Amino acid sequence: MSYSHTVRGERFAFSDLRDLLAKANELKSGDGLAGIAAASERERVAAKLALADVTLGEIIANPVIDPDADDVSKLILATHDRETFAPLRSLTVGEFRELLLDDATDEPALRAMRWAITPEIAAAVAKLMGNKDLVYVASKVRNVTRCRNTLGERGVFGVRAQPNHPTDDLAGILVAAVDGLAFGCGDAVIGVNPATDSVDTVAAVLTGLDQLISGLGVPTQSCCLAHITTQLAALDRGAPVDLLFQSVAGTQAANASFGVSLDLLREGRERVRESHRHRAVDWVGDQVMYFETGQGSALSAEAHHGVDQLTLEARAYGVARAFDPFLVNTVVGFIGPEYLYDERQITRAGLEDHFMGKLLGLPMGVDVCYTNHAEADQNTADNLLVLLAAAGCNYVMGVPCADDVMLNYQSTSYHDAATVRALFGLRPAPEFLAWLEARGIFRNGQLVPGSSPALLSGLERMLVS
């Protein structure tokens, strides 16, 4: 099915829904690199106007990638709630936007329709929204998850402590993790990206983090963000796996480039759940998966099928939600300026990703970050961080001094997270907050400066022993 629209006497034609979605996207350097972006702002406006008149039923009837050739498309259709979708079918994308923005469309209403909304529908409506719209609708929704604590409740702003080390030195990792705990960070997860994806390294990191959590009695979960097969091999050796991590993308071919399949994700989840049943831990819930995504990943793998990077990002969320994850986050500026060129594009992508993930029912976090060769700086991160806090983001990253010395990119710091919590009156996860209060690190829900000597002495005893 082709589409067209006339703007000021100039007619623009779009060959199919995939082309229309690409041309209606906000300016992204990745879409330009792929050769699918609108050639002018006038064409972009024409595409948005044409997209506003497309019905949601048309989007369901015209998959952007053939389900017979792509297991992500097949999964999206298999998990679609057609009964709940029936009253939405005849709405246009423009009308659906108005429905989402309507004050009467509250959290229960959005929660009820989440499985009726496909990733492509979420992507389509995101393209018609301004940044303020994306913040407002996302702020209506809270997607709560449970593992060793409870994350995502209204008023909670979680932080992943990210104590990476360039040589995977365990003492260095643990010191950086305790630094995060002293700022009230780490309730989402204490998650380490290993410099070496080896079973020995991953097992050592997981064991060390578990000893830290157990030794200090911290109600949080750990993760080592290696490849899923490496983590499962470490699990086979007896390493404690709280959360099983994997990067995922929006096409079968892109996931294959990561060395992962839907079947492998299913197997991994069940193996970790089974291991939890045999560990002496007071689990709050059984959500055990942690997924990371990012606009541009499919294009960088030459696996985008001519689909724009925003729509493919939404499809990655279609993969993630099928596995009932504890955490999902987009690493919004990590891939580089080839895909998100500058502050405007990074900010827009972060708000789009968060909105789409929340709409689809995910516990959505954002790594507010940029590479050193992007047209961005720490003010970019500050601006997006504040916008996401207003939007009800589940969690962000806490990186020592905001400078990841292993991954070599810029993110948000423990100090940044503490500032945003103070600014918006937000707090850590409830079980984690109770631990912080008992340790004297927080008082009446607020961080107490200079309250961490007991943590440091506890870590020193662990390292000596």
Image (spheres, rainbow, N blue to C red):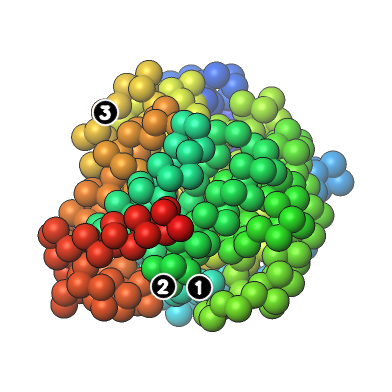
Q: Nearer the viewer, mark 3 or mark 1?
A: 1
Residue type (three-letter) at the residue carrying disc 3: Asp
Q: Nearer the viewer, mark 2 or mark 1?
A: 2
Closer to the camera, 53 or 418? 418
* Quarter residue 18 falls in: top right
Q: Indicate the position of residue 72 as horizontal and vertical percent values.
A: 74, 49
- What residue is pinned by disc 1? 148
* Quarter residue 283 falls in: bottom right
> In the image, is residue 8 above or below residue 224?
above
Residue type (three-letter) at the residue carrying disc 2: Gly
Residue drawn at point x = 42 percent, y = 59 percent:
462
Could you say which disc has been placed on residue 217 in the image? 2
Residue drawn at point x = 18 percent, y = 54 percent:
419
Q: Earlier in the sequence, mark 3 or mark 2?
A: 2
Determine whether label 3 and label 1 are within 8 Å by CB: no
- What residue is pinned by disc 3? 377
* Neighbours of disc 2 within 10 Å: few (<14), some (14-19), many (20+): few
Say whether residue 69 is left or right of residue 225. Answer: right
Distance of label 2 from label 1 (alpha carbons): 11 Å
* Neighbours of disc 1 within 10 Å: few (<14), some (14-19), many (20+): many
Q: Is residue 38 something one can see in this rendering?
A: no
Q: Indicate the position of residue 91 as horizontal and vertical percent values.
A: 55, 62
Q: Nearer the viewer, mark 3 or mark 2?
A: 2
Q: Secondary structure at mark 3?
A: loop
Closer to the camera, 299 or 385? 385
Distance of label 3 from label 2 (alpha carbons): 37 Å
